Amino acid sequence: MANDGLKKETASDFIWSIDPLDSTTNIVHHATICCVYLNLYHDKRQYTGFCYNPMSKELFYAQEGKGACRNGQ
């Protein structure tokens, strides 16, 4: 995921980004796939990310160097 649009407003090397509702078109058409994304960048590189689908109650998580999981597994 590119972070070209992130705006750094603090002295921290960490930046959080959130996409509160991805797949808006799916919501409009009553599809069951939509997600909320939360990402943490460190030194302009994505370090960890979360993706939650409220329709299926699935939480995906990944961290650099530690792999990924779904609902804790």
Image (cartoon, rainbow, N blue to C red):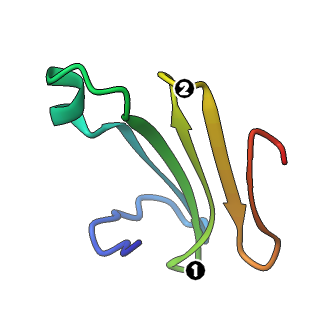
Q: Residue at x 75, y 39 (%)?
A: 71
Counting other residues with Cα less than 10 Å from the Cα at mark 1, is it few (<14), some (14-19), or many (20 or more)? Answer: few
Residue type marked 2: Ser
Residue 25 falls left or right of residue 8:
left
Q: Which of 70 and 49 is in front in this view?
A: 70
Q: Which residue is drawn at 22% across and 32% down?
A: 26
Q: Where is residue 69, by image quadrant?
A: bottom right
Q: Which mark is residue 30?
A: none
Q: Where is residue 59 in the image (x, y as percent from the top left)?
A: 64, 38
Q: Position of residue 44 (x, y in %)?
A: 50, 79
Q: Which mark is residue 43?
A: 1
Q: Residue 56 carries which label?
A: 2
Q: Position of residue 42 (x, y in %)?
A: 61, 73
Q: Which of 8 and 5 is in front in this view?
A: 5
Q: In this view, does 14 lie above or below 53?
A: below
Q: Position of residue 10 (x, y in %)?
A: 50, 60
Residue 18 falls left or right of residue 15:
left
Residue type marked 1: Asp
Q: Where is residue 1, by image quadrant?
A: bottom left
Q: Which of 51 and 71 is in front in this view?
A: 71
